Image (cartoon, rainbow, N blue to C red):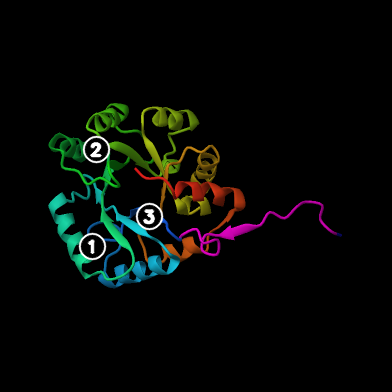
Amino acid sequence: MVSVFPIRRRYSLCESGYFKGFTDWHCHIIPGVDDGLQSERDLNTVLRTYARLGVKEVWMTPHIMEDIPNETLTLKKHFTLIDIDYEGSLTLRLGAENMMDHTLHDRLQQNDLLPIGESGLLVETSYFTPPILFHETLERIVDMGYTPVLAHPERYVYMGESDYRQLKDEGVCLQLNLPSLGGYYGKLAQHKAGELLRLGLYDLAGTDLHTVEMLPKLASLKVSKTKLASLEQLKENRV
């Protein structure tokens, strides 16, 4: 018996060509500075995979937080060595992912920051509770001339649609973690990512890459034609 229900085809990000011209706004691939890649060999493997997929630009965004107190000068030295040695097709950039804790408050005070894009400041919070003075800190970032970019908002269990819309009203950009669409962080994050994408609330996309194995898994991640169209629109955005 022939089914009367239409088959909705899903496309892998690789076969759809999604990664051609893609900018990865969030990844942890500087070896040995945080919980991301730990060896130069892994870095070279990841960079080759990026290039093979057609990625255009990669923003390396190591953690800066109380538990991982990276310093700007040290990160710049690590990045410079990578950038000098690299001879491939990718454009490599340095930013940071800033936990909204006392470390960020100190860095804001000193204007000691590593933005992404022209003026984006990538920030994150605990997955379970908002930070103290959350909205006041975001306002301070805006007043300093930066655009707050909230990393992986779909992973914050304390946030709902009204919270996301309030953040957008406050001038905050929302950055999707692509693995969320495949359930990498669980069903709740997957559902919220799909809804935020459907509602058009995301501004940027990134891999949040921490391991060599993650990128091939992302390349084979299958999404609907509707989701793919929404993802394509994000590729045009800058911050």
Type of residue at label 3? Asp
Q: CA distance from mark 3 to mark 2?
A: 25 Å
| Amino acid of disc 2 | Asp
Q: Which residue is mark 1?
A: 32
Q: Check disc 1 and report its element: helix, strand or loop.
A: loop
* Label 1 Cα neighbours within 10 Å, binned few <14 / some 14-19 / many ≥20: some
Residue 106 coordinates in the image, percent (x, y): 16, 37
* Residue interval drawn in magenta: 2-19
Residue type at the position of mark 1: Gly
Queried whether the magenta region covers residue 52, the answer comes back as: no
Residue 126 visible? The answer is no
Q: Residue at x 40, y 61 (%)?
A: 55
Q: Which residue is mark 2?
A: 101
Q: Quadrant of residue 34?
A: bottom left
Q: Earlier in the sequence, mark 2 or mark 1?
A: 1
Q: Under tag 2, what secondary structure?
A: loop
